[in-house]
Image (cartoon, grey):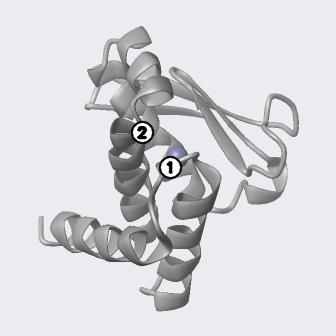
Amino acid sequence: MISRVYGILPVWTIFTEKFLPQGRAGQCYGIFNVIKPASRGDKGIIEHELVHSRQWYRGLGVFHWLRYKYSWAYRYRAELQAYAVQLTHYDEFSVSRMMLFAKYISETYDLRIKYDLAFSDLMIEYERISDD
Ligand SMILES: [Zn+2]
């Protein structure tokens, strides 16, 4: 599946079990996103990875990767953005989904962020993009 970010820049989404880190439903590799086949119908996950593709283009590829890898603050902002956008792609808002995403953010990205802070920052980011 081909998508466009910023109107013109292409991103290819591939549905496969390969190239996915253990336990992950999706992974962004710049212009290629990998989503596990079971999540093919999950627009939220697809859009989450497309946010990272936008970040990748905006960060000129390698600079995004370096910042994502070496700056926990950048990685935190990148994931808050991606999860906030993901939340907007489900039929209805769900606090339990937001709690689940805050848990992922605080536990699975090697961040020094406690759950409560991840939850409130995710709420703020979600409200910020929902106001647009
Ligand atoms: Zn992400």
Can you give x and y, in whole percent of width and height, for residue 82 in the image? 42, 52
Q: Nearer the viewer, residue 37 or 23?
A: 23
Q: Residue at x 27, y 31 (%)?
A: 7
- Where does the C terminus fall, quadrant-wise? bottom left
Count residues near mark 1 (Cα–Cα under 10 Å), then give few for <14, some for 14-19, many for 20+.
Answer: some
Residue 72 badge: 2
Q: Amino acid at mark 1?
A: Leu
Name above or below for residue 35 compared with residue 42.
above
Residue bearing the label numbered 1:
111
Dot 1 falls on a residue whose secondary structure is loop
Residue shown at 64% from the left, 62% from the top: 42
- Look at the numbered discs 2 and 1 and tell me whether their residues touch, using CB distance below 8 Å: yes
Q: Is residue 89 above or below residue 17?
A: below
Q: Is residue 10 left or right of residue 126?
A: right
Q: Amino acid at mark 2?
A: Trp
Q: Relative to 25, is 122 above or below?
A: below
Q: CA distance from mark 2 to mark 1?
A: 6 Å
Residue 39: name its quadrant.
bottom right
Nearer-the-camera pick, 87 or 5: 87
99 relative to 126 in the view: left or right: right
**What kind of element bears circle 2?**
helix
User: What percent of the width, then of the height, locates residue 69?
Assistant: 50, 26
Give 97 or 106, whichever is nearer the viewer. Answer: 106
Q: Give the farthest residue toward the left.
A: 132
Q: In which image quadrant can residue 107 be found? A: bottom right
Mark 2 surroundings: few (<14), some (14-19) or many (≥20) residues within 10 A: some
Rendering quarter of residue 16: top right
Instruction: Identify which residue, 1 or 57, lies in the foreground.
Output: 57
